Image: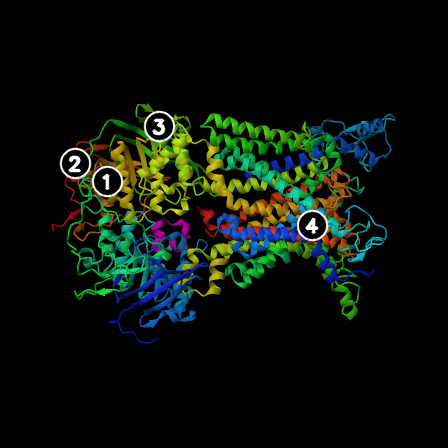
């Protein structure tokens, strides 16, 4: 191999264009993309789904599949052009010089091969290492990625590890050959936030330790701020802005970047007086891109005749910081001007009590073992839940996987009946009434919005038909014609064109499907709506619009919204009260302000610290939880959080390991389930502080 | 007259099939023209495998339809001097006619028997497959959806039937002695009830919110269904419109009986997969009944694999019918059924291959067409 | 694990009981018994004579009792005729009335007497199973490796010409039932007047009149390539297509998995990816299919043995069924059911062992 000068870029992509070829047409996925990664630098690629960021990564690995082809430009790695490299040479580079980590850790590991073998394979291929040496190296790297008991893990099959451990193994595998460049494609998206924080820390430390350059792909601006030095914002197959992270975050020079930041809930945004500003319109389909600037049709600064005249080139800004933007008007726009505030709305006062849960429990019996034998185990999905919700109120239910929030939703809806405790819905006790036994009026008043937009609508029924069916079953409308009219009104309410009534769900985008789901839920004039992560599967720019739609409908209908989410940013933005759950228990409950400021439950504290925030002004205390969330099948004794709690030593006598903590009422309506003394709780410092401007 | 040479035989056969060529041409021209608007069926025309399969299948469908026009002789007529005649032998005494594909050992025209045989297969196989699907779906949906005891019980019965070697089952079910005992009628009474139940439940679950309309639809479908049921299962249709030859009923019922458990297993598997979807949960939280969710939320979304399996299953049923014929079960000796013709022909196979080879190739091409069609459909339905 | 096998064995036993009872019921229907009486005694019997024949042969006892007799849990019937001669289920020609045991059923290892072959069922069954065993063995040896090879080769690079050719071959073989492929193969290779044999004979390349033999009767004494080739290929062909398609589907699915991409991006060569990463995962599903093929093979065996006149299990089954040989049929169905159930059990256990995900989760 020829010598490579470390002061030169390690990866240099120039005017890269990639297309996918289908039977009908050529679909350009990436156009005229350039970026440079220097040695030891970490570069972030950010953009919404379909913007081509993963395609760039795969092009660097030259693994575009049979339909994908590089149609122009060059990718130089350590000075050598990858686009014209032979398969043989590529194999030498893959895994040894460039390694890649992607989203689904479970899917990235071979299920039928022991972890140790999969790790050892890398040096055996690239360094002709013997099996024993390779295993020894694997063992060392496993301890490098901070996994306990490396010997056991070497012998384990992937499915025997938790999601977080699997991702650490994938990282270990990437590091086995000490690559010069590491490509990470949404490495933490499939993980819980507290686990994500650990992985992000690990990646940063290892990058610094081995001097590895990184190409970090994410849709999450907060993560990029945490991990990267430089950043490239992509939109519809093009890089629209490149620069240092701080530069781009604070002095963005592209309207898309600006719009993106205005649509994500940062601290300070508020649903009443500082609402988010959604980006109008839709992402253009790859074969329907506009002439000129791709972002033009959705841009506030669009000038007809200029922005849509010809393809816009990247322009280098004169700040000497390699800051580039793909905007013709960057010099004319007043970037400091505050956003046009849409409309300020009044906060609604909470009305009458509509839902009251007392000491609700839900246990499941499951059998374990591959052959159906084994002892029956009880999963305590919900333990002694007590809370209430009022008209007009948004109550957020926050927690990570396995915390029991979905079970709670099922019990509320009547899909399951409670094991114990009481649910008072309006004026009726419904804990023992399954949904079949509830009358249509009751059912229509309590409805649900689902998480996955691709799953929430029946794929083989038109949008209109699905809403009409809801109207029929809720006994709304007097005739077919009346119901059609009501259906169209519902489409108006969720701001969808009436023509959508005849469309099939596959013709709709994710956000549009979610709107249909909302319309369907409100078909019978729902009074309580359980929204199970309604925006978490949507792109950030769409999230704002859907969240605001929910808020609008709530204001009009005086709905009670139970907003289930793991995303604390959006919770802070739109909820009035917050309930934090962990392993089936409510660990903290209070108004949004109470929960987001000290005193915290130790779990809330860690959760707040783990959530990445895309704001350079925010200073966070870093609290990284050890280990993974215990299984609900086998919860720890005593306090459910004791296995990961950093405050545990502050409680004398090992109380946390023995006894379930009592509910402490801190202030008006603020409850914490913790053994910590009041002094300690009151003395907690805020996790997030915003530097003065 | 001299015997025909092979090119001439082929040419003359091509002429006999003229109605089929015209119908095929029309079908393809129309389908190709409107393929963008025809959903999955239209997409079939993007796959060459699927198109070839469809062409072969339609060839046999049209052959069965126009069999009277295509056949050159009465398939049962035994003409003197034509015993085991070689392909292309001119018929003695009738100027200008030939046994295009020769004569069998009873001096009947092999070509005409093959053409007529298509008719029998293409009536029984699709109809039996449809009934088997109705039974399999009606039982598979609740087994997968509810699980528990229903599932255990139904799965046990399905596995029981599947554990039977098919041929043993046929030998036990399809004999003249069994017909005397009325067991086929009892089986028919059970199996034919499923389509009626299926349609009634389908309509009821959809329209129960509007009782007037529900009563009309369910009533009409029940009246029509029970009318056909009385005729087909018990041969007691007062008007005589619906009836089935007891021999045919016996074969039909056994074929349904063998196929239904497999359909049951497929449907059950798909339901287990689909019932965790959010739109199913949405239906449940809306207070829909279980049958609406099974029939209107789950079933339409299972149509891809089911359509593919439907094509494969018609092919498999064709093979089963051939097997029955091969063992001489449930067919009259006169019948032009492909399976029994192969069985007849194989006795002199080493000397006169043509009486057996012709129906063998016919059966193979039909099943091949169905398999190719299924493959094309599978490929195209996965492209979405 | 032990619990699983016990439970499965219980279900198997239940299934076997249910199935044999159904066979028992169907073969003991009145019309069948009358037919049996006439074929055993005299075709020209009057109805009264038939009735008394049935009575004297224990066929008028309740169905369940007779099923119990067959199982060996109920004492066998005895009948004393007018002359005082005692006949009975357990009184065989070589056993005196006194020495005869009370029960003689399957549990005692007595399978009864075949009415068609006039020999003990166990003897006939053992001989025919022996013949079929050889046939099955050769079928498996030909079918499984060929099918897996075709499946893996076409599945590892989806959409290539190799894939298209092999897939079409697989589809064609699944469309050809044994009674069709058998006929065609015989015509092509085993006919003195058609196919390639006459040509080869003319050229003097083969000494006999045909290349392969059109019957397998001689294979019962000595198996040769020429007398066994056609029946083995006929059965194998149908199975090859099916297994190959399953393997291909499984292989193509595995090849699109993320971990294959991981391996590729680790720098593993294509051959190594197939051998080390893809094969084990891709063969899990076909393994089940292969095991479940046994019952299907049984079908093929029946057809092929009839077609090639090879007196194995299938041939015996057909003879027994077409003559309502009750004892023989029951024994055949027990064997068939056992084959089906045991292969199901093996496939379930094997699946769990091949798939580490299930074993330990």
**Front-lying residue, B222 or A209:** B222
The Cα atoms of the two marked residues, 1 and 2, are separated by 29 Å
What residue is shown with label 2? A678
Mark 1 or 4, closer to the camera: 1
Rendering coords of residue A597 (x, y %): 17, 41
Q: Marks 3 and 4, how far apart in space?
A: 60 Å
CA separation in Å, label 1 and label 4: 70 Å
Q: Secondary structure at mark 2?
A: helix
- Say which of A546 and A659 sits in front: A546
Foreground tag (3 vs 1): 1
Q: Secondary structure at mark 1?
A: helix
Asked if the residue at tag 4 contacts the one at tag 1, i.e. Cβ–Cβ closer than 8 Å, the answer is: no
**For mark 4, what is the residue?**
C301
- Of the residues under marks 1 and 2, which one precedes in the sequence? 1
Q: Is residue A523 left or right of residue C340?
A: left
- Image quadrant in which you'd find residue B278: top left
Q: Whole-Å distance between the Cαs marked 2 and 3?
A: 31 Å
Percent across and percent down for residue A581 are 28, 38
Same-chain check, marks 1 and 2: yes
Give the distance between the C-alpha atoms of the residues marked 3 and 1, in whole angstroms. Answer: 31 Å
The residue singled out by tag 1 in the image is A574
- Residue A165 among those drawn in magenta: yes
**SS at mark 3 in the image:** strand
Q: CA distance from mark 2 to mark 4?
A: 81 Å
> Residue at position x 56%, y 49% from top?
C288
- Residue A689 located left or right of residue A437: left
Q: Residue C239: which disc?
A: none
* Pointer 2 or 3: first along the chain: 3
- What numbered label is drawn on residue A420? 3
């Amino acid at each position: 191999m020829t010598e490579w000068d470390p002061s030169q870029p390690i990866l240099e992509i120039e005017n890269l264009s990639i297309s996918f070829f289908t039977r009908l047409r050529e679909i350009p996925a990436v156009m005229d993309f350039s970026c440079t990664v220097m040695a030891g630098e970490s570069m972030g690629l950010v953009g919404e789904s379909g913007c081509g960021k993963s395609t760039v990564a795969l092009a660097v690995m030259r693994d575009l599949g049979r339909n994908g082809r590089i149609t122009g430009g060059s990718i130089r790695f350590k000075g050598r052009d990858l686009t014209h490299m032979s398969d043989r040479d590529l194999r030498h580079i893959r895994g040894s010089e460039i390694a890649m980590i992607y989203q689904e850790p479970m899917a990235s590991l071979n299920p039928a091969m022991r972890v140790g073998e999969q790790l050892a394979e890398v040096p055996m291929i690239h360094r002709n290492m013997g099996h024993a040496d390779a295993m020894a190296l694997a063992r060392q790297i496993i301890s490098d990625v901070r996994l306990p008991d490396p010997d056991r893990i070497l012998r384990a099959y992937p499915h025997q590890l938790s999601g977080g451990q699997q991702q650490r193994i994938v990282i270990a595998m990437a590091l086995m050959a000490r690559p010069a460049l590491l490509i990470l494609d949404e490495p933490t998206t499939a993980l819980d936030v507290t686990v994500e924080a650990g992985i992000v820390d690990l990646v940063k430390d290892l990058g610094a330790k081995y001097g590895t350059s990184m190409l970090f792909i994410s849709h999450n601006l907060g993560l990029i701020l945490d991990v990267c030095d430089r950043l490239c914002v992509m939109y519809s197959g093009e890089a629209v802005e490149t620069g240092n992270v701080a530069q781009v975050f604070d002095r963005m020079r592209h309207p898309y970047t600006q719009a993106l930041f205005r649509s994500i809930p940062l601290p300070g945004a508020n649903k009443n007086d500082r609402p988010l500003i959604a980006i109008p319109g839709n992402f253009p389909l790859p074969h329907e891109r506009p002439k000129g600037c791709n972002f033009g049709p959705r841009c506030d600064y669009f000038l007809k005749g200029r922005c849509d005249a010809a393809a816009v080139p990247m322009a280098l800004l004169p700040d000497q910081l390699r800051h580039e933007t793909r905007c013709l008007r960057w010099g004319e726009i007043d970037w400091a001007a505050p956003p046009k505030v849409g409309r300020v709305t009044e906060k609604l006062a909470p009305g009458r009590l509509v839902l009251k849960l007392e000491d609700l429990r839900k246990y499941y019996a499951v059998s374990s073992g591959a052959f159906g034998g084994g002892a029956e185990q009880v999963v305590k999905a919900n333990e002694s839940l007590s809370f209430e919700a009022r008209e007009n109120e948004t109550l957020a239910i926050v927690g990570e996987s396995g915390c029991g929030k979905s079970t709670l939703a099922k019990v509320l809806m009547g899909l399951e009946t409670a094991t114990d405790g009481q649910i008072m819905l309006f004026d009726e006790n419904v804990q023992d009434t399954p949904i079949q036994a509830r009358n249509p009026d009751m059912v229509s008043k309590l409805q649900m919005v689902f998480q996955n937009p691709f799953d929430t609508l029946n794929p083989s029924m038109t949008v209109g038909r699905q809403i009409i069916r809801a109207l029929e079953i809720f006994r709304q409308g007097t005739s077919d014609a009346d119901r059609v009219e009501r259906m169209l009104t519902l489409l108006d309410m969720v701001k969808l064109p009436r023509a959508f009534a005849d469309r099939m769900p596959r013709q709709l985008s994710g956000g549009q499907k979610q709107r249909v789901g909302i319309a369907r839920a409100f078909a019978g004039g729902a009074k309580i709506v359980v929204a199970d992560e309604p925006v978490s599967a949507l792109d950030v720019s769409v999230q704002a619009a859907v969240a605001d739609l929910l808020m609008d409908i709530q204001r009009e209908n005086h709905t009670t919204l139970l907003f289930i989410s793991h995303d604390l940013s959006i919770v802070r933005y739109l909820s009035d009260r917050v309930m934090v759950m962990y392993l089936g228990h409510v660990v903290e409950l209070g108004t949004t302000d109470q929960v987001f400021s000290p005193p915290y439950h130790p779990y809330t504290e860690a959760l707040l610290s783990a959530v990445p925030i895309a704001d350079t002004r925010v200073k966070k205390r870093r609290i990284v939880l050890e280990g993974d969330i215990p299984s609900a099948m086998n919860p720890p004794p005593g306090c459910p959080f004791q296995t990961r709690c950093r405050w545990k030593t502050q409680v004398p006598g090992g109380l946390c390991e023995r006894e379930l903590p009592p509910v402490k009422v801190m202030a008006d309506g603020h409850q914490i389930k913790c053994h910590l003394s009041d002094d300690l709780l009151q003395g907690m410092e805020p996790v997030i502080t915003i530097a003065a401007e | 007259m001299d015997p025909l040479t092979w090119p001439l035989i082929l040419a003359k056969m091509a002429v006999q099939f003229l109605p089929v060529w015209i119908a095929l041409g029309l079908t393809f021209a129309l389908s190709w023209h409107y393929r963008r608007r025809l959903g999955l069926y239209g997409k079939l025309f993007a796959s060459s495998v699927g198109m070839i399969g469809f062409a072969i299948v339609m060839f046999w469908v049209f052959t069965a339809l126009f069999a009277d026009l295509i056949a050159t002789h009465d398939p049962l007529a035994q003409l003197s001097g034509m015993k085991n005649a070689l392909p292309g032998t001119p018929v003695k005494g009738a100027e200008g006619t030939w046994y295009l594909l020769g004569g069998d050992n009873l001096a009947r025209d092999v070509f005409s028997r093959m053409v007529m045989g298509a008719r029998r297969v293409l009536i029984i196989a699709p109809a039996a497959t449809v009934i088997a699907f109705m039974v399999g779906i009606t039982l598979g949906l609740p087994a997968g959806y509810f699980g528990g005891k229903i599932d255990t019980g139904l799965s046990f019965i399905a596995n029981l039937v599947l554990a039977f070697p098919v041929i043993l089952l046929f030998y036990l079910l399809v004999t003249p002695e069994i017909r005397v005992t009325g067991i086929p009628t009892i089986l028919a009474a059970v199996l034919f009830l499923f389509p009626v139940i299926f349609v009634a439940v389908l309509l009821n679950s959809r329209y129960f919110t509007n009782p007037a309309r529900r009563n009309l639809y369910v009533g009409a479908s029940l009246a029509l269904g029970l009318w056909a049921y009385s005729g087909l299962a018990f041969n007691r249709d007062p008007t005589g419109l619906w009836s089935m030859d007891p021999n045919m009923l016996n074969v039909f019922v056994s074929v349904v009986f063998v196929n239904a458990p497999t359909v049951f297993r497929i449907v059950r598997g798909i339901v287990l997969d689909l019932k965790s979807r959010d739109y199913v949960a949405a239906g449940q939280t809306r207070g829909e009944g279980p049958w609406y969710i099974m029939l209107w939320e789950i079933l339409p979304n299972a149509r891809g694999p089911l359509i593919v399996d439907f094509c494969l299953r018609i092919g498999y049923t064709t093979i089963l019918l051939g097997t029955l014929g091969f063992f001489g079960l449930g067919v009259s000796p006169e019948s032009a059924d492909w399976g029994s013709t192969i069985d007849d022909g194989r006795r002199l196979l080493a000397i006169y291959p043509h009486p057996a080879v012709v129906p063998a190739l016919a059966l193979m091409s039909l099943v091949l067409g169905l398999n190719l069609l299924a493959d094309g459909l599978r490929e195209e339905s996965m492209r979405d | 694990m032990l619990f699983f096998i016990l439970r499965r064995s219980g279900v198997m036993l239940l299934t076997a009981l249910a199935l044999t009872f159904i066979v028992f019921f169907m073969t003991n229907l009145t019309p069948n018994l009358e037919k049996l009486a006439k074929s055993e005694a005299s075709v020209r019997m009057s109805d009264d004579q038939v009735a008394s024949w049935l009575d004297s042969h224990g066929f008028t006892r309740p169905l369940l009792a007779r099923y119990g007799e067959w199982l060996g849990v109920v004492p066998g019937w005895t009948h004393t005729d007018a002359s005082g001669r005692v006949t009975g289920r357990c009184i065989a020609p070589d056993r005196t009335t006194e020495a005869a045991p009370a029960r003689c059923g399957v549990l005692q290892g007595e399978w009864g007497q075949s009415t068609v072959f006039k020999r003990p069922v166990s003897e006939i069954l053992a001989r025919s199973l022996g013949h079929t065993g050889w046939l099955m063995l050769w079928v498996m040896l030909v079918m499984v490796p060929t099918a897996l090879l075709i499946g893996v080769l076409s599945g590892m690079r989806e959409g290539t010409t190799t894939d298209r050719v092999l897939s079409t071959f697989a589809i064609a073989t699944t469309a050809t039932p044994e009674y069709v492929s058998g006929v065609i193969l015989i015509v092509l290779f085993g006919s003195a007047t058609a196919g390639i044999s006459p040509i080869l004979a003319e050229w003097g390349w083969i000494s006999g009149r045909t290349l392969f033999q059109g019957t397998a009767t001689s294979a019962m004494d000595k198996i040769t390539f020429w007398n066994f080739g056609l029946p083995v290929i006929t059965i194998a062909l149908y199975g090859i297509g099916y297994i190959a398609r399953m393997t291909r589907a499984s292989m193509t699915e595995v090849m699109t998995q993320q971990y294959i991409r991981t391996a590729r991006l680790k720098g593993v060569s294509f051959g190594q990816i197939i051998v080390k990463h893809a094969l084990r995962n891709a063969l899990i599903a076909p393994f089940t299919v292969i095991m479940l093929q046994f019952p299907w093979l049984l079908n093929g065996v029946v057809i092929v043995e009839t077609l090639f006149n090879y007196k194995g299990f299938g041939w015996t089954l057909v003879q027994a069924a077409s003559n309502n040989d009750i004892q023989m049929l029951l024994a055949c169905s027990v064997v068939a059911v056992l084959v089906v159930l045991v292969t199901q059990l093996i496939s379930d256990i094997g699946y769990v062992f091949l798939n580490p995900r299930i074993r330990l989760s």
